[in-house]
Amino acid sequence: MNANDLKQDAPEITLESLIETSGKTQRELGIALGVTELTIRNWAKRRKIPRLDNAAALAAELGVSLKTLTRSLQIDVARVPDDTRYPSDD
């Protein structure tokens, strides 16, 4: 088994699955982010992509990294390095 086999066996991360795992509704997320439920639904269905400020807020609400959120939107971030040079304020 090689790395490609593992990638194929891994379940796809979707925004819908992240929302479901969070236990929050699209309506609750919309209220928390100051956007409509329709906006959240459009992001979840990949009809639209959130602006960076909304993506950061959404990732925080869902308790995931921006990289995970980006993957859930089917944006390739494989070549984006993890940020080790600039530690977070956490």
Image (spheres, grey):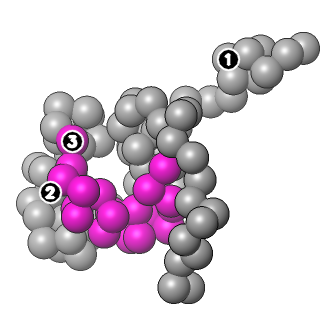
Q: Tag 3: residue type?
A: Ile
Disc 3 crowd rating (10 Å Cα; few below 14, some 14-19, many 20+) is: some
Please tell me the numbered disc located at residue 65.
none
Vertical arrangement, residue 45 with respect to residue 90, above or below: above
Residue at the disc numbered 3:
49
Magenta portion: prevailing SS class: helix
Q: Tag 1: residue type?
A: Gln
Q: Which of pointers 3 and 1 lies earlier in the amino acid sequence?
A: 1
Task: Give the quarter of the figure containing the N terminus.
Answer: top right
Vertical arrangement, residue 9 with respect to residue 13, above or below: above
Taking the spot 31% from the left edge, 69% from the top edge, the residue there is 57
Instruction: Specify whether residue 52 is painted magenta.
Output: yes
**Eye-nearest disc, 2 or 1:** 1
Q: Label 2, label 1: how many angstroms apart (C-alpha)?
A: 32 Å
Taking the spot 36% from the left edge, 37% from the top edge, the residue there is 73
Residue 18 placement, left or right of 45: right
The residue stretch that appears in magenta: 49-67
Instruction: Specify whether residue 8 is painted magenta.
Output: no
